Image (tube, rainbow, N blue to C red):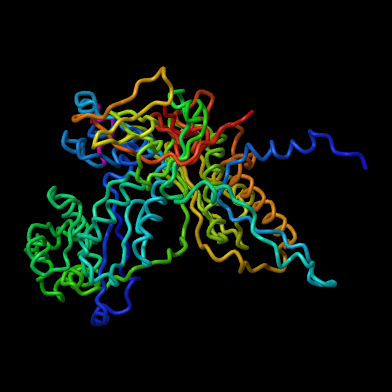
């Protein structure tokens, strides 16, 4: 039997990419047919398939996806067009990367809090930090828990 | 607005309260549709915002700021254009994909707080707090509010009471009273007395405009008067429904929590056209699409339909030749097949179509719904065809669930027609597609619509 070309292996993965990710529980395929012979000795060890949602998301109801549009966080490995996973239920800790609202706009920055003073730091020298002062509209929407970067 | 028939809910209104006294909380999202828009657009915070009904007809959701400048629920858009301009009111078409997803998030979040929850509408839920009687319920409600706001971004109001009707009253009063912090507990008799005295009988849950007028003739205008009215006299006036409302106002629970949603007995799919439609071919295409939507719902609840009706109508508010007609088809054997029901719907449409009429609206109604698992075949039915149909529908539903609505559809629906297409009426789109000129992206349900942040 001729060995499979590289393309043969890659193609299905590509096809699957365009589909929307669903929080389905993938039922494992049971390899034994009941009517004949002994069951496969592996059947007792079948586990459920790995689900990326489970790995990336703690609280689905509070989790939102957003698309990155600038390069202000490039030093933290967050590139334009990356997908950010934002969990609204998490409280920011010092140095968490957060999605925040500042004066009517969304922004992704590193949250730092020292002596009651909050600064939203960019991870790119070309972008200024944002110091939060009285009278500013400011709210932490949620903590960015993961970034999904396409390597293509 | 959400009046239901309380008749079906209770077996005996006279029975005494159960041993452990029930406690209900009604949680609802403030200006829910507007709040959903605000979650994804912070520039709307503190601004007047309204959301319009299907086809951008009239106001169905407004923020407090919009209310303050004089916009009322139900106002037609064209009558308030001056106010909108003067006060820079932000106007949006309804985005049900977004609201539906945000609603599901809100309900999931609420479910953490009690094992017993009844989703009452897209933005309202009753929670049973009977098991929490030892706690400070107002405190607990404030915690619920805080977590819903944090996890979903939606601000809520919470009313607590020993009955559903009182919980509804408490919720409304909590919203009106700015010092309540969005929470009001009406379990206490003294609190009930003072709130009900200020509460219009017409605003009590289940009292419609007509009932309110009848009560007024009896001298009953406040909720307190209604509570203390002679219950038999109220029943004479408003039937058993009125009796239950009085008892509920007295703190005697008659309406239980309904945790399992009953399947629909009828499915209606219908919308107004974006612009006038004259041609049979266009009507047929629209009917095919509405039938498709209705069939999806039908299969989701695993029912089969035995009777299908189609109706057409003109714009009642326009000075033109008026026409309304409907046709009903008995399907014989129950079916949930989109192809069969579209064929029947278009056949029925042909019998009522008239030339030279300016049509405003058409729709499909599926009724006599029974479980799909119990379809009875007659001697002459082709069961093999039925099995094939079922298989084809399953494949279509699976593909559309995975690849997006209308990826696969029946040819009769037209090549580029799409009822819930994104945004505005595009040139080249069929005349009958809905107008939704100011619809926001589906931020939570479409990859290409995700919020962009810098």
Q: Nearer the viewer, residue A42 or B342?
A: A42
List x then y, in percent, for residue B101.
43, 46
The reply, left or right, for residue A102 in relation to residue A45 is left
| Quadrant placement of the C terminus of chain B | top left
Residue at 85% from the left image edge and 38% from the top image edge: A4
Q: Does the stretch in magenta take in B352? A: no
Q: Is residue A66 above or below residue B181?
A: above
Q: Position of residue B274 (x, y in %)?
A: 43, 32
Nearer-the-camera pick, A72 or B432:
A72
Decide: is B317 above or below B191.
Answer: above
How many numbered circles does the render carry? 0
Looking at the image, residue B14 lies above or below residue B47: below
For the point 49% across and 41% down, the residue is B445
Observer able to see residue B50: no
Q: Nearer the viewer, residue B411 or B66?
A: B66
Which residues are the magenta region? B74-81
> Is B49 placed left or right of B110 in the picture?
left
Q: Nearer the viewer, residue B227 or B134?
A: B134
Residue A5 x %, y %: 83, 34
Is residue B60 visible from the viewing direction of this image?
Answer: yes
- Quarter-of-image position of residue B405: top right
Extreme residue in the top direction: A126
Residue that lies at the very extreme toward the front in this rendered image: A115
Image coordinates for residue B305, horizontal then vertical, percent: 56, 59
Q: Is residue B170 above or below residue B285?
A: below
Q: Is residue B278 left or right of residue B105?
A: right
Q: Quadrant location of residue B60?
A: top left
């Amino acid at each position: 039997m001729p060995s499979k070309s590289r393309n043969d292996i890659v193609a299905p993965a590509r096809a699957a990419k365009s589909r929307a990710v669903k929080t389905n529980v993938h039922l494992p395929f049971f390899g034994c047919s009941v009517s004949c012979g002994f069951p496969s000795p592996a059947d007792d060890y079948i586990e459920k398939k790995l689900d990326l949602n489970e790995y990336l998301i703690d609280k689905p109801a509070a989790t939102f996806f957003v698309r990155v549009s600038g390069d202000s966080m490039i030093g933290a490995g967050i590139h334009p067009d990356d997908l950010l996973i934002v969990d609204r239920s998490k409280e920011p800790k010092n140095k968490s990367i957060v999605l925040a609202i500042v004066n009517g706009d969304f922004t992704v920055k590193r949250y730092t809090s020292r002596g009651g003073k909050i600064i939203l730091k960019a991870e790119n020298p070309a972008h200024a930090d944002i110091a939060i002062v009285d009278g500013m509209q400011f709210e932490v929407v949620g903590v960015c828990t993961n970034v999904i970067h396409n390597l293509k | 607005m959400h009046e239901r028939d309380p008749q079906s809910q209770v077996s005996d209104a006279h029975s005494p309260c159960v041993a452990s006294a029930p406690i209900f909380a009604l949680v609802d999202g403030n200006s829910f549709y507007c709040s959903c828009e605000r979650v994804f657009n912070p520039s709307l915070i503190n601004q007047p915002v309204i959301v319009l009904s299907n086809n951008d007809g009239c106001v169905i959701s407004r923020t407090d700021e919009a209310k303050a400048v004089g916009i009322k629920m139900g106002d037609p858009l064209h009558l308030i254009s001056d106010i909108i301009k003067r006060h820079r009111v932000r106007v949006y078409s309804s985005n049900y994909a977004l609201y539906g997803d945000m609603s599901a998030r809100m309900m999931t979040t609420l479910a953490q707080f009690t094992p017993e929850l009844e989703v009452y509408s897209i933005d309202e839920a009753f929670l049973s707090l009977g098991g929490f009687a030892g706690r400070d319920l107002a405190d607990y409600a404030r915690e619920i509010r805080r977590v819903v706001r944090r996890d979903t971004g939606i601000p809520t109001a919470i009313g607590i009471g020993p009955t559903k009707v009182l919980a509804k009253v408490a919720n409304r009063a909590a919203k009106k009273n700015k010092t309540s912090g969005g929470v009001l507990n009406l379990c206490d008799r003294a609190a009930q007395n003072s709130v009900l005295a200020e509460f219009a009988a017409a605003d009590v849950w289940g009292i419609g405009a007509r009932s309110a007028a009848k009560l007024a003739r009896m001298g009953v205008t406040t909720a307190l008067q209604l509570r203390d009215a002679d219950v038999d006299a109220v029943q004479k006036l408003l039937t058993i429904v009125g009796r239950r409302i009085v008892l509920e106002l007295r703190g005697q629970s008659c309406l239980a929590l309904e945790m399992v949603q009953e399947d629909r007995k009828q499915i209606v799919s219908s919308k107004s056209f974006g612009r006038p439609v004259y041609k049979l071919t266009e009507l047929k295409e629209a009917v095919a699409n509405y039938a498709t939507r209705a069939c999806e719902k039908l299969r989701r609840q695993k029912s089969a339909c035995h009777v299908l009706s189609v109706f057409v109508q003109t714009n009642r508010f326009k000075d033109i030749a008026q026409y309304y007609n409907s046709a009903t088809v008995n399907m014989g054997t129950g079916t949930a097949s989109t192809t069969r029901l579209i064929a029947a719907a278009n056949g029925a449409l042909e019998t009522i179509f008239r030339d030279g009429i300016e049509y405003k609206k058409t729709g499909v109604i599926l009724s006599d719904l029974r479980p799909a698992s119990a379809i009875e075949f007659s001697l002459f039915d082709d069961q093999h065809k039925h099995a094939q149909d079922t298989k084809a529908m399953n494949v279509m539903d699976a593909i559309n669930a995975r690849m997006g609505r209308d990826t696969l559809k029946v040819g009769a629906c037209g090549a580029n027609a799409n009822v819930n297409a994104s945004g505005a009426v595009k040139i080249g789109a069929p005349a009958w597609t809905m107008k939704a000129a100011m619809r926001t992206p589906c931020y939570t349900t479409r990859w290409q619509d995700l919020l962009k942040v810098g």
